[in-house]
Amino acid sequence: MAAAERKILTARMTQPGYSVRIEDYLAAGGYAALKKALAMKPEDIRAEVTRSGLRGRGGAGFGTGLKWSLVDRKSSKPIYLICNADEAEPGTFKDRQIIHRDPHALIEGIVCASYANDVRTAYIYVRGEFAQGYKILLAAIEEARAKNFVGRNILGSAYSLEIFVHRGAGAYICGEETGLIESLEGKRGYPRFKPPYFPAVLGLWMCPTIVNNVETLANIPVIIQMGGAEFAHIGTPGNTGTRMVGVSGHVNKPGCYEVELGKITYGELINGLCGGVPGGRKVKAIIPGGSSAKIIRCDERFKGKKRDGTAYDWGWQDVPVDFDSLPLVGTMAGSGGVIVLDETTDMPKAIANIAEFYAHESCGQCTPCREGSLWMAKALHRMTHGHGQKGDTDYLKGIADNIPGRTICPFGEACAWPVQSFVEKFRDDFVKLEK
Amino acid sequence: MADNPTTPTPAAEMVNATINGIKVQVPKGTNLIEAGQRVGVFVPHYCYHKKLAISGNCRMCLVEVGGPMRGPDGKPVLNPDGTTKVTMAPRLSIGCNTQVTEGMVVVTNSPAVQQAQNSVMEFFLINHPLDCPICDQAGECKLQEYSVEFGKDASRFREEKVHKPKQVDLGLRVMLDDERCILCSRCIRFMRDVAKDDCLGFTNRGSHTTLTCWPGKKLAGNYSLNTVDLCPVGALTDKDFRFKMRVWFLKETKSICTSCATGCNIVIWSRENVVYRQTPRENDAVNECWMCDAGRHNYKHINAASRLKKAFVSGKETSYADALKQLAPKLKAALADRTSVAFVGSARATNEELYLFSMLAKGSVSDCVPRTWDGDSFLVNADRNPNSAGAKIFNVAAAPMGSKFAAIADGIKAGKIKTLVVHQEDVTRRGIGADLLAKLSLLLVVDFRPTETTKAAHFVLPGVTYAEKRGTFTNAKGRVQRVWPAVSLGGEERSDWEIFRDLLRETGQPDRFADIVALFADMAANVKPFAGLSLEKIGDGGVQLG
């Protein structure tokens, strides 16, 4: 099977001459889904989304229909929808494609999702560094308002929606949904503990809140247009639809590729779509789901049985690009950002870079993550600057082992997993630094 | 930090659980730290405080939690022996934010929990200065205590520590050392939720997170020092107390703050008869765990060098016995005509003192000095006398309090009042000036410090402060609470009730009060609001008068 993209979300933006202006979006059939949606009952739209099997594109791959079904609709409080546009996971650059190149796809998705969930106020929490994206979104919302796709009595219906765009202040942790909510409330971006602060029940302003990723929301108009059942035929069962995968690192053609879930392998993605590794060098390892995902060594073999009983025997090239295959090989699909490391890569230096990022971004709330993230970064900095000491490898691993599972939010795992996996899989490279 | 202003209120419904195999029954909503405490299982914690919103940040209270395994039918799965099968959660849970549910199984001493506690302690200490020898918190530091119990014996930290601001002046009374701070946020939550003065917060991120005052704000409110009590480490220190004394040298004595009518329960910390600090003592009926800064620092007069340690007759120092001997016939003669004697009692005196004072003053005019100032909606009462209620019960105070001062002054001026007995007050500041006092033929003052009134007195008998005696105070809500002696000056001064007892005896009344217990029993028998009470019944926490 020749590897190919399946352009659904990226179909418009990759057309020559396509711009962010609403005219271009309308010319490409935009906002038709909204018209269709407004003629439907909200619960029917929710049923279609459940039927579509759409899973959250932010990182965890949680079923969108299921997420919506958990919203407390009996609280008599308003329900809020937040579009999580705080895309900050290193190696991830898919949401920004939508924001910068096809913002109306997102806005239409937000209006449809809001209508489906009786939401009257929606927020786009946009990453602070996306200064241009912020401006594009503001302009796009004004365009949409002028055409009555947003605002009071949308397209003459009884439904009204306000969308506010909030720019973050540059904190990675504000991409974590409860940290985001705190930040949106004007507070320090500290994730909340669950229970009791499940956003679906006690979210923004202690009201039921839906937090969906940009790419997830951009899929909603697609589902409304083609129907949930039809959408479920894209991709593979349990991993429906397409996914925008950002590939970076040592490849000839880095970039964001939209692929059908489960229909393409990492080998086809990297060696096919991305044109392989430059200079004919070999892949040493890949980080498949943003920098917090555990690394895969190119010479590993993965054998076992899937949940449905079928056996698998994979090298890294054989692993399908979807949500459920990566956990079978000990890592995760995460945010969909793939980082390719070729044989010239200095692994301790690579992880030192990643560790420094997490030390910088730890919010500082929970002790193990706050202290451990910086400790790992300092140890790695020392080791990679010629001051390695005897026992440093186990020392480093020991720090990382004490963090996961002991923090309020998954940042603890995010900062520890890369270090654990790098040291486990490339132990010799670290031992070499000990003096 | 979300808005959860109170810990969950335990409902009446009870739930059963086991903690380390010990059965426990607690009200629904009780968390694992509190539940453990009920059966003697200690779950270490830093950020959790029962009176503050839960933050869940320190991760010290991680425990293993499990519950009854449920089958596909939703019913509990049973072991072959008929007991309920238990499944333990794969992740540890924080005890502060986990409420006991029916059938819950909690383990706080398993290897997994111990490993977690050990590693959290290590994380706390890597960037901590470990400057215990020069840290004021040493001896009452939770880092030290938990290090011994849950920590490692040596550090394996090979990097340079994070450096942060030292000696940060947060306001009038509190000094901050950011390097010692463990970022538990107790102080922030207290100021925000309890003191309603949101002035503290964190800046920077990760390990560089730094406690600070918001721009333009200071930690200067009247409750700021409670943050020092709450601080589990040596980050926040009381400027008044820091570097004065090692805490392990200090003796703790239960007492009551006498700075206003609230009567906050306190502990007096003293060494070798010098008071070094006062801290709040928990009493949910009065002050919970808090006290105001003004009351806390209102102890300097106890240690003052100017304290009266001897009796004085016409300004000359003499022994108590000698003064009493000279005073007795004069006072007895003066009391023959009750209308020629006036009494100024003190609403700062104990109930027992006021009881005896009322006996002395019987048939004469008497009053007390009222002290009203601004109160607040939290702990500070507008009435700054600690025992106005008692002064009213024993009729030592006029109604309204202070209304008789003009009459007493006029009586002295007219020559009708020739004798004045004053307890712990400086009447020259209440309209009875030195010129009037000079007209008296007998001025007797019982006080612990020199005042303009003691200067004018014919007789001064040395009393003591609340920190040196036994007795009870009645607060604004009618709660009777006890004080105990913390210090003693070692001079001729004595408890004021003993002085009044001696005066009663010397002026011909039967000597029936061998000690404070007998005195209280007599009072309980004769004064209705105290009927049925005893010092023992009042205990540490006080009793509400009927």
Image (cartoon, coloured by chain):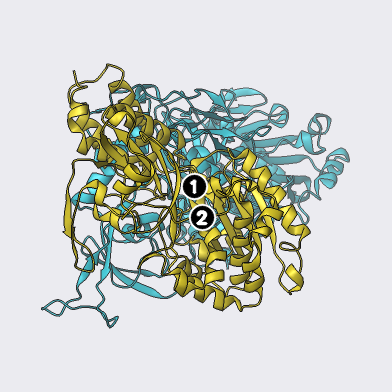
Chain colours: A yellow, B cyan
Residue of label 1: A94
Q: Front-most of B149 and B396? A: B149
- Which quarter of the image is occupied by the C terminus of chain B? bottom right
Q: Front-most of B292 and B227? A: B227
Tag 2 near tag 1, CB within 8 Å: yes
Q: The disc labelled 1 sits on which kind of residue?
A: Lys
> How far from the left and from the top, in percent, is residue B270?
44, 33
> How far from the left and from the top, in percent, is residue B173?
59, 31
Say which residue appears at 24% left-offset and 78% top-offset: B71
Chain name for mark 1: A
Q: The disc labelled 2 sits on which kind of residue?
A: Glu
Is residue B516 toward the left or the right of residue B404 in the image?
Answer: left
Structural crowding at the residue carrying mark 1, measured as other residues with C-alpha within 10 Å and reported as few (<14), some (14–19) or many (≥20): many
Q: What is the number of callouts on the image?
A: 2
Residue B517 versus residue B125 in the image, above or below: below
Residue of label 2: A215
Indicate the secondary structure of the residue bearing disc 1. Answer: loop
Is residue B460 toward the left or the right of residue B180 in the image?
Answer: right
Same chain letter for marks 2 and 1: yes
Q: Is residue B401 visible?
A: yes
